[in-house]
Amino acid sequence: MILFVFEGERREPMLFKSIEQLFFPSSEENIVCSFGNNIYELYRQMHELGDGADIAGVLKENGAISEDYDMSDFSDVFLFFDLDIHNENQPPQISAAQISEMLSYFDNETENGKLFINYPMIESIYHTGSLPDNDYWQYSVSISDCSDYKKIARDFPPYSNLDHLCVTERNKTRSDIVSRIRMNWIYLVGMNIRKANLLCQGKHEDPTQKDNISQPSIFSSQHHDFIMANQTISVLNAFPLFLYDYFKPEVFKMR
């Protein structure tokens, strides 16, 4: 059984439901929950509990999963959260060093969980031109604009909604539509991994190995080359990066 932990309660679970239908075998049992707060709060609670902490216990304390679950029930744990550095409610003591520490803590799906970060937030899934978008590598947003990023991303043409990425009750019997949605996700995987490889390795091409675009490497590049250099964030979405990390790379080769 795999546990997927999301920051939000609506958009992330909705997107994952489609990912699950498109890519995961029907025999795989997945548990989906929403923490309802940012990753910094989840890390704070885990850190306060010390070496004996387990994420299932923290999630139960917050009412995110059923009391019936224990950590031993889950083979893997994956977490999906926003960077959220623009948030005025974020503790002011959060620093780049502490974010790097947090990524080191949430670096293993069989232990504390493996964290995938949205840059700057989940709405980056909207921030693309018609798929496949050859200009995706260029897209960034200033930190000062991140407070309006939900609107900025949703207004970015041509996708005003997520119909191009969501398998629904209405379209799930249309094989042509489902195939197109699956291909859109494959495009997104290719665009995000090549952009991440450009950030981390300086080459806009598929990574030669998955470790080249690890979450700590991506954050380090974002911090040095964008956040500190010019107060911007290079747009990336956690879901395509997770798919590449989880499955065999050939599944997402551009066709």
Image: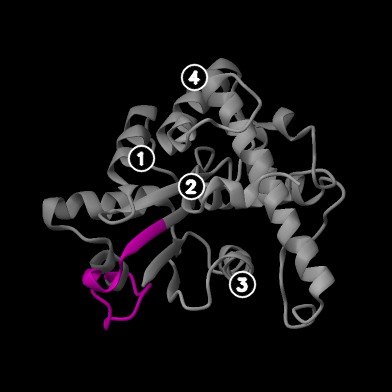
Reading the chain from its start, which is encountered first: label 4 or label 1? 1
Tag in front: 1 or 2: 2
How far apart marks 4 and 3 lie (CA) works out to: 37 Å
The magenta-colored residue range is: 61-78
Q: Can see residue 143? A: no
Q: Position of residue 16 (x, y in %)?
A: 57, 65
Q: Amino acid at mark 1?
A: Leu
Label 3: which secondary element: helix
The residue positioned 87% from the left and 50% from the top of the image is: 158
Q: Which residue is farthest top? A: 229
Reading the chain from its start, which is encountered first: label 4 or label 3? 3
Residue 103, labelled with which disc?
Answer: 1
Q: Position of residue 151 (x, y in %)?
A: 75, 49
Characterize the local packing of mark 3: few (<14), some (14-19) or many (20 or more) Cα atoms within 10 angstroms: some
Residue 21, labelled with which disc?
Answer: 3
How far apart marks 1 and 2 lie (CA) works out to: 15 Å
The residue positioned 57% from the left and 63% from the top of the image is: 12
Above or below for 236 versus 208: below
How far apart marks 2 and 3 lie (CA) works out to: 18 Å
Tag in front: 1 or 3: 3
How far apart marks 4 and 1 lie (CA) works out to: 16 Å
Characterize the local packing of mark 1: few (<14), some (14-19) or many (20 or more) Cα atoms within 10 angstroms: many
Q: Position of residue 46 (x, y in %)?
A: 24, 54
**Is residue 77 part of the magenta span, yes or no?**
yes
Q: Amino acid at mark 4?
A: His
Residue 245, labelled with which disc?
Answer: 2
Identify the residue under disc 4: 224
Q: Is residue 111 left or right of 9 when viewed as pictured? A: left
Q: Main secondary structure of the magenta part?
A: loop
